[in-house]
Amino acid sequence: MTSRKGRARRNSDCTAGGLRPALRAPHRPRRDEGAEQAFVIGVLATAADFARARTWGVSDAPDYERYLADTAELLADALERFETVRARMFHPQDFEEFCLLHGLDPAEPAARDRYLVNPPLQTQLLAYQGEELAGDFVPRLVRARENGLTLCHADLLLEGGLLGGAGPAEADEEHARWVRAAYQRGGEVFRRMLVGAGAGVYELRLRVDAPGGRLTAAARVLQWEDGVVRINDEELELICAVLCAGLALELPGVAVLHGSQGSAASCGARGGAADETRGGAADACFLPTAWAWSSSGPDWAPAARPVRLDGVAAQPGYSLGTVC
């Protein structure tokens, strides 16, 4: 069989004939109900992870570069054959611990399949839409794993009310309403930060001190003068979740919004990514800036003094109550 591009299709078990090295799980496709509807893939994010996973027979590729090339080809083929293509980072240590917990042999493809679709890790999945694998998508997969772990931590603090898992929230509608209200308040806090900042290219860094360890989140944002915002969906979800947990449980926190303030359209940046670099005359259109807010629990307000978060120095921000 050939694809619409006339190229020979790769087998669904992710092996290839001829001189090509075979690609085995974590690339084994997993279909949801309804054939040809969804495709899920696990991707090794570093050369070190690749070397470690080879001991389980994950790939016969001679090196990490060839592994990425074969993975990119597999993803391109999946985009033609499946309505939905999603990926997550295949983390060797996570996988090893998963196998130990469930009594599985990591060398068995079935163990890799179970790890790949493990329900508690679904928060780490990203939709793939043809992005360059090494340049943008793999770093996003790494962040998605970290973000997914934070999201699960926040959900645990909220007794399952955030992700809708089993627990008190399933039987207690009042608890669910409480969490939803806090989530909406968190989203509104973030919206007011962006509205007050105006057009520009920013990064928000957020930290909430929580039982069991700090909840942290970061998001890169491109905002145009007409209020249109570009942000990765998974980063937006995490920002709102961390703000939700902090507000619901009245936990202390700090947030810093920093970047370059200015009219993106007048600088010819419309259509660029949130982390796009600019040079020359465009630099003059943007004003470096950094604002900080803190929370004692029930609300967010300008920081009482200058703040340094993750190496970023910021001055007290504007009042969010005055932003519409």
Image (cartoon, rainbow, N blue to C red):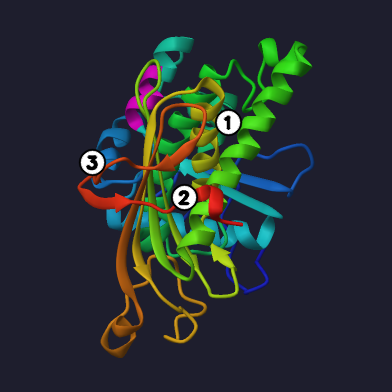
Determine whether label 1 and label 3 are within 8 Å by CB: no
Residue 93 inside the magenta-drawn segment: yes
Residue density around tag 1, few if under 14, some if 14–19, many if 20 or more, within 10 Å: some
Distance from disc 3 to disc 2, alpha carbons, whole Å, reads 46 Å
| Residue placed under numbered mark 1 in the picture | 117
The quadrant of the picture occupied by the N terminus is bottom right
Q: Nearer the viewer, residue 322 or 180?
A: 322
Residue furthest to the left: 311
- Using residue 30 as the reference point, say whether residue 282 is left or right of it: left
| Residue placed under numbered mark 3 in the picture | 48
Counting residues from the start of the chain, the first of labels 3 and 2 encountered is 3
Q: Does dot 2 land on a helix, a strand or a loop?
A: loop
The quadrant of the picture occupied by the C terminus is bottom right
> Which tag is nearer the camera, tag 3 or tag 2?
2
Residue density around tag 3, few if under 14, some if 14–19, many if 20 or more, within 10 Å: few
Q: Nearer the viewer, residue 175 or 8?
A: 175
Residue furthest to the bottom: 281
Residue 111: give x, y in percent of width and height: 49, 23
- The image shows residue 29, relative to residue 119, as above or below, that is below
Which span of residues is magenta-colored? 92-97
> Which tag is nearer the camera, tag 1 or tag 2?
2
